[in-house]
């Protein structure tokens, strides 16, 4: 197995060499290497959570697959579910020599987080996947198609600092593919839209565009939209269980029951998730206030009411970033989110006044 990047001392960091290590193919990079330094000093190794079981975790590391458990101290100090490891997390693990089990001591900082929580209940955030570059919002063109739902996923992506991509699957069953694409483009002009047929593999290459070595994508959407079938098409063989017969009456049943990472042999990583039900998508506006409360209150102190927190004089947000109190990336995420929310409320207004905007007709399903 390839050497552990974090123990290479003064050598070139990940990505600097030509040969990628096993860890780099899993997404390990200089940012993580830096964050891992104190744990390397304690003799721990970096590992990535690929499956979350009830209380244990399957970990991938340069020593292969490990079974991980959090330490008693970790459990004691975690204040909520969101502080436990989730699929996609990089953790500091301690392996006993000659064993394939590991003790998880800490989670490295998360970048790109897909999470859900109930509005007004910040304590009950559930992390669905972490360290994700792209959220593939998978919709079936067989009646699952619903623009407002797609919009909510786009907000979730913005909130987590993930790039959204809309995948309109089951193109073979669509009455009018072009119309569906047009409706999504109208609603979200900046978000890429692709149509696929997971059964024939048509359009699959549009997903690989966003992947590549070390990159992680997560597929989310309602149950039965074809997420696992798409992953099987990407891998080229059936690795994930899919629903045997495509029947709408099975909608309530989830075929995929756990979040799981699937490696695409040097072409990146995809995370399969069980279908999310509508009730799990919550009020975006209150989330914005909750998630970016620090920035929102700073924004209230800017000299100008319409401050864009860019180059304006007297900007409290930029001041906080310069002092190192606020991470610049958080401001970018906050900006993306505000832009999405602005666009969504404009959409809602247009819908409310039928004369002005187009409204998708038909089943509305
Ligand atoms: N006609 C057609 N059927 C598809 C396509 N993609 C998936 N299916 C079928 O849709 C059904 C559901 O597919 P799954 O991949 O299990 O759906 P899923 O999104 O993973 O569902 P959950 O795991 O329950 O969230 C299966 O019977 C697939 O064969 C497609 O592009 N065209
Ligand atoms: Mg599935
Ligand atoms: Zn400002």
Image: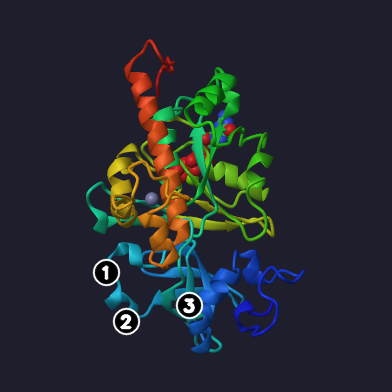
| Residue furthest out toward the left | 120
Residue denoted by label 3:
92
Contact flag, marks 2 and 1 (Cβ < 8 Å): no
Horizontal and vertical percent position of residue 206? 65, 40
Horizontal and vertical percent position of residue 292? 34, 53
**Figure check: 154 above or below 31:** above
Q: Nearer the viewer, residue 313 or 135?
A: 313
Q: Is residue 203 left or right of residue 334?
A: right
Q: Quadrant of the C terminus?
A: top left
**Figure check: 364 above or below 131:** above
Residue denoted by label 1:
79
* Residue 64 quadrant: bottom right
Q: Quadrant of the N terminus?
A: bottom right
Q: Earlier in the sequence, mark 2 or mark 1?
A: 2
Q: Between marks 2 and 3, how big is the CA–CA gap?
A: 14 Å
Q: Nearer the viewer, residue 82 or 34?
A: 34
Q: Is residue 13 left or right of residue 97?
A: right
**Figure check: 365 above or below 219:** above
Residue denoted by label 2:
73
Q: Residues within 10 Å of mark 2 (few under 14, many from 20)?
A: few
Q: Is residue 160 left or right of residue 61?
A: left
């Amino acid at each position: 197995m390839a050497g552990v990047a974090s123990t290479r001392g003064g050598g070139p960091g990940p990505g600097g060499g030509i040969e990628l290590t096993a860890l780099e193919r899993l997404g390990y990079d200089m940012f993580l290497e830096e964050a891992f330094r104190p744990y390397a000093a304690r003799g721990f190794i970096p590992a990535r959570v690929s499956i979350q079981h009830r209380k244990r975790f399957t970990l991938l590391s340069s020593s292969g697959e490990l079974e991980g458990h959090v330490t008693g101290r970790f459990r004691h100090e975690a204040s909520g579910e969101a502080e436990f490891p989730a699929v996609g997390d990089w953790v500091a693990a301690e392996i006993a020599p000659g064993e394939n089990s590991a003790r998880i001591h800490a989670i490295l900082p998360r970048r790109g987080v897909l999470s859900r929580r109930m509005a007004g209940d910040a304590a009950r955030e559930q992390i669905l996947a972490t360290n994700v570059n792209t959220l593939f919002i998978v919709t079936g063109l067989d009646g699952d198609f619903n623009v407002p739902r797609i919009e909510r996923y786009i907000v979730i992506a913005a909130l987590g600092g993930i790039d959204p991509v809309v995948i309109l699957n089951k193109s073979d069953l669509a009455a009018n593919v072009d119309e569906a694409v047009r409706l999504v483009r109208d609603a979200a002009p900046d978000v890429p839209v692709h149509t696929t047929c997971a059964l024939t593999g048509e359009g699959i290459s549009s997903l690989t565009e966003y992947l590549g070595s070390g990159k992680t994508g997560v597929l989310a959407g309602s149950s039965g939209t074809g997420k696992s079938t798409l992953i099987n098409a990407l891998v080229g063989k059936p690795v994930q269980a899919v629903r045997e017969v495509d029947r709408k009456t099975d909608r309530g049943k989830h075929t995929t029951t756990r979040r799981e990472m699937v490696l695409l042999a040097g072409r990146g990583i995809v995370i399969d998730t069980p279908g999310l039900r509508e009730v799990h998508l919550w009020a975006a506006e209150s989330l914005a206030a909750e998630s970016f409360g620090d920035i929102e209150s700073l924004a209230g102190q800017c000299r100008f009411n319409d401050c864009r927190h860019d180059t304006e004089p007297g900007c409290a947000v930029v001041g906080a970033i310069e002092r190192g109190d606020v991470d610049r990336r958080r401001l970018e995420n906050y900006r993306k989110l505000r832009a999405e929310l602005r666009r969504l409320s404009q959409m809602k207004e247009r819908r409310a006044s039928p004369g002005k905007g187009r409204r998708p007709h038909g089943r509305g399903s």
